[in-house]
Image: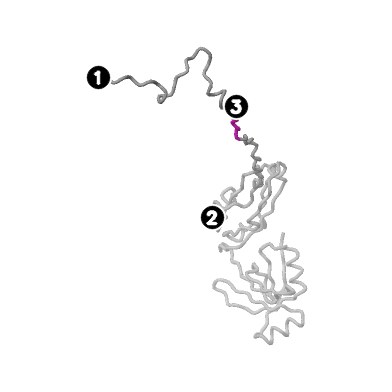
């Protein structure tokens, strides 16, 4: 898909000039490139907002026409917004020459419903865009990933993506999308102590006598004090 935008070259610059432009519905801009002289631009706010809605966060190549000059290939390099209203305050474009390698972020589009999510997993997509480096002719509009067969506990990494002529400016082992295993909180309930405490046995006088009574037929021994002493032999 082609994206086009017409802008005008401007001579006025400075804070007061930029404020006046914004009140008139014009966004101050600038365009530059390797070996190219920077040129100040005035960008129609309505047209630029419409373009942003069309590209929806992508960083595509734009055919930028400056006044009556032939269109040039460019990308939106940086953009400044007002903190509260998010209104665009300024924009910088970078000219892209043929065979020149550029670095930009490409959005990730996920396709399908993962098996792991159907099994109770949680979908995690930490990289919603991936920085790449390549020639203008090789720049993809987006990176589409089929996650239908993604199982619970598995991930798709940057190293799994193959694009001809494209270098990924990121760690190859970085996960793009994963299906996380949910944490199951197991409540351990301490079992109540069921051990029965036995009451101490009460020994009565009668029982003590029974325990001390010798068995039938057994001779009762007298205490040593009661046994007769042998007569000492007379010398």
Q: Residue furthest bottom?
A: 16
Residue 206 counted in the magenta span: yes
Q: Name the N-terminal-most of marks 2 and 1.
A: 2
* Res 113 quadrant in image: top right
Q: Which residue occupies the foreground of this view, 135 or 162?
A: 162
Residue appearing at x 59%, y 26% in the figure: 207
The label shown at residue 234 is 1
Residue 103 counted in the magenta span: no
Classify mark 2: helix, strand or loop.
Answer: loop
Q: Disc 2 versus disc 1: distance between alpha carbons?
A: 115 Å
From what the image shows, is residue 86 above or below residue 138? below
Residue appearing at x 57%, y 55% in the figure: 166
The residue indicated by pointer 3 is 206
Q: Give the range drawn in magenta.
A: 200-207
* Res 75 quadrant in image: bottom right
Q: Which mark is nearer the camera, 3 or 1?
A: 1
Q: Where is residue 107 in the image (x, y as percent from the top left)?
A: 66, 58
**Residue contact at pointers 2 and 1, CB within 8 angstroms:** no
| Mark 3 neighbour class, 10 Å CA radius: few under 14, some 14 to 19, many 20 or more | few
Residue appearing at x 71%, y 84% in the figure: 19
Q: Disc 3 versus disc 1: distance between alpha carbons?
A: 48 Å
The residue indicated by pointer 2 is 171
Q: Name the N-terminal-most of marks 2 and 3.
A: 2
Q: Is residue 183 left or right of residue 100?
A: right
Q: Position of residue 202 (x, y in %)?
A: 60, 33
Q: Which residue occupies the foreground of this view, 197 or 1?
A: 197
Classify mark 3: helix, strand or loop.
Answer: helix
Q: Name the N-terminal-most of marks 3 and 1.
A: 3
Residue appearing at x 47%, y 18% in the figure: 220
């Amino acid at each position: 898909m082609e994206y086009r935008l017409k802008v005008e070259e401007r001579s006025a610059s400075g804070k007061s000039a930029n404020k006046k432009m914004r009140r008139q519905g014009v966004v101050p801009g600038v365009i530059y490139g390797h070996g190219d002289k920077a040129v100040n631009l005035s960008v129609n706010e309505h047209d630029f907002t419409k373009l942003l809605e069309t590209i929806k966060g992508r960083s595509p190549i734009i055919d930028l026409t400056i006044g009556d000059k032939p269109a040039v290939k460019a990308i939106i390099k940086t953009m400044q917004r007002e903190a509260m209203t998010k209104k665009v305050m300024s924009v910088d474009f970078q000219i892209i020459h043929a065979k020149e390698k550029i670095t930009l972020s490409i959005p990730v589009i996920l396709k399908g419903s993962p098996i792991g999510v159907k099994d109770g997993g949680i979908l995690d997509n930490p990289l919603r865009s991936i920085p790449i480096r390549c020639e203008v002719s090789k720049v993809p509009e987006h990176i589409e990933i089929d996650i239908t067969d993604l199982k619970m506990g598995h991930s798709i990494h940057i190293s799994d993506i193959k694009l001809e002529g494209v270098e990924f400016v990121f760690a190859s082992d970085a996960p793009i999308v994963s299906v996380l295993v949910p944490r199951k909180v197991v409540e351990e309930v301490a079992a109540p102590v069921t051990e029965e405490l036995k009451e101490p046995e009460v020994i009565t006088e009668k029982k003590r006598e029974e325990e001390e009574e010798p068995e039938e037929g057994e001779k009762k021994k007298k205490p040593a004090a009661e046994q007769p002493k042998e007569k000492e032999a007379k010398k």
